[in-house]
Each structure stands twice: as C-alpha cells, then as structure tokens.
Amino acid sequence: MLDLSQLRSFVTVAQTGSFTLASQHLGLGQSTVSQHLQRLEAEVGRRLLARDTHRVGLTADGEALLPHARQLLAIERQAVALFDAEQPHGTLRFGISEDLVSGQLPVLLQDFIADYPSVDLNLTVALSRDLAAMLDRGELDLVFAKRRVGDQRGEPVVRDPLVWLASDPERVLAKPVLPVIAFPPPSLTRTLLMEALAASGKAWRIVCSCHSLSGLTAAARAGIGVLVQPRSLAPAGLREIPPMALPAIEDVEFVLIASPSADRNTVAAFDRLVRRRFAKGLSASA
C-alpha cells in the first residue's frame, strides 16, 4: 500500500525539482524526504527520480505515477476538508495577468479545484493595471499580476527580467526602424519597453498591438517584429535577442493583491498554492 507521506514528498520534489526546496516546503529534514523517496521506489519496484548536478527530474515511471499521486493526496485533503470549518468555500473572483494564461493558469486551476472543491471560481483575464482597477472597484477578490520592481502594492511571488524576443532576430535588427509588437495601453510591459527605447534614442514604431498574448505571439512568430515578455514566460518559437543588441528593460515582479473584503481563508489557500507552484520560477510545469 502506498504511503501518503511518501507520496507527498514525491509530489513536492517533482514540483520543486529539488530535495532542499521540497524539505523546506514540507517542514521536514532533507534526509527524511530522501528516505521517503527511497522507500517509495522500493515499494513500487521502479526508479522514479532522475538526478543530475543541476536538478532532480522524473523518470518515465515517475511521470506515470505523478498524476495518481496528486489524485490520492487531493482525496486526502478533500476528506479532511469535510470536518474543517475553516476550509475555503463560496465564490472566488480571481483576476490573472494575460502573461500567465497559456503556461500557468491550467495547472493553477487544476490544483486549486482539486484541493478546494467547495470554491467556485469566477475568472477574469486582463492586463495587470486593468485588473488592479477592477479590484479597486470591488469587482475582484484576488489578482495575480505584474508590477514594477519597487512598487509597494501586492505581495511579491517572483521577480523576472523582461527580454526582447523575435523569430529571426538578425532580420528584425537589420531594419532601420525597430518594429515592435506590444499590448495596448495601459500595459506595464509596453510602458517599460517604451521607456527603455526612448532612453536609448533608437528609432522604433509599434507595428502590431493586441490585447491577447496569443495574438501577439502569432505576430512575432510571423516575423512582423520584436516582442517583450518575462524571460520565464517566453513563448515557444521565439529566440531571445542577445544583450547589448537592444536596450535593457527593467525587471518586473509578479504579485498577489487581495481585496480587504475577500474571504481570508480562500485568499490564504490560493496564496499557498501559487507560492508552491512558483517555488522554482515561472517556468515550472511539474
């Protein structure tokens, strides 16, 4: 019979890619987490983890076990929730930045609903500043969005550099006027890239603007111009333009902003989930 403590250590190592981070998240000694994994591998009779000098990954058997392990742990949490009056419930009006939709939103929703089936999600996807304005108007309970480094609003989750991207950097850079693909105002990314270009004195113009990241990505893949995105969220099919070829842009921070009227238990639960998901950076997908 599979031990839930061992499965919990296995899932956390898979999510963080590190025994050290997993032990910190679980509040256990690193040796204990290692023993859990050794015993689990002995129980199933298969090697579940592949280790190298940089990180811990999953073998094919580990990948096969992971969704079942998550399901068993979710069932355990749901059973405990039946007798916990403090468990999140009701409706959560959640706003998330367009940047995070394609890569992070599906796994966030999957994990949250699995952990807290009594919560109904009302989801809004928009630009970060629009989401903040909606929260101020009382239309949202919780926002996961970007801010400038140094801004005070929100609780920081992770910091990420903004980078220039293109399908064919050499061809785009050869143009006398730099063609730029960007979100429309009031996009923070747009503001920061325009400030960087203005300070550099480089000639540029916005050749494509769209509220949808998928639309901007399609334009960049078609070779229309350069696109700016957080490095860890760079869309597939685009190459990062080497430093010094274009002016450096400020980093951004992804933050959680909660409404004072939001249910504190629900907000705290989502905060824990987001920090667990992003323990090893925005590109985490385990």
Image: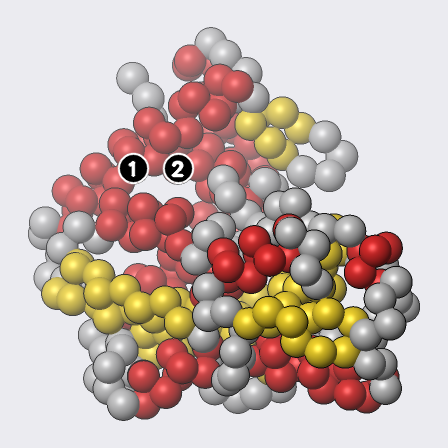
Query: Could you say which is closer to the camera, residue 90 or residue 139?
Result: 139
Horizontally, residue 242 falls left or right of residue 68, namely right
Residue 179 vs 133, above or below: the answer is: above
Label 1 residue SS: helix
Colouring method of the image: secondary structure
Instruction: Find residue 211 and report its horizontal and vertical position in percent.
Output: 46, 70
Instruction: Find residue 42 and report its horizontal and vertical position in percent.
Output: 48, 14
Res 56 seen here: yes
Residue 253 vs 69, above or below: the answer is: below
Tell me the kind of residue under disc 2: Arg
Q: Which mark is residue 146?
A: none
Horizontally, residue 233 falls left or right of residue 174, namely left
Residue 211 vs 235, above or below: the answer is: below
**Measuring 46% from the left and 52% from the top, which residue is drawn there?**
102
Check contact, mark 1 vs mark 2: CB within 8 A: yes
Query: Mark 1 or 2 closer to N-term?
Result: 2
**Measuring 76% from the left and 34% from the top, which residue is drawn there?**
53
**Residue on which disc 2 sits:** 8
Horizontally, residue 260 falls left or right of residue 167, namely left
**Residue on which disc 1 sits:** 73
Instruction: Find residue 202 and report its horizontal and vertical position in percent.
Output: 85, 81
**Disc 1/disc 2 C-alpha distance (Å):** 7 Å
**Residue density around tag 2, few if under 14, some if 14–19, many if 20 or more, within 10 Å:** many
Instruction: Find residue 149 and report its horizontal and vertical position in percent.
Output: 63, 81
**Measuring 57% from the left and 36% from the top, which residue is drawn there?**
31
The mark total stands at: 2
**Measuring 52% from the left and 78% from the top, which residue is drawn there?**
184
Query: Could you say which is closer to the camera, residue 81 or residue 143?
Result: 143
Res 160 seen here: no
**Residue density around tag 1, few if under 14, some if 14–19, many if 20 or more, within 10 Å:** some
Tell me the kind of residue under disc 1: Leu
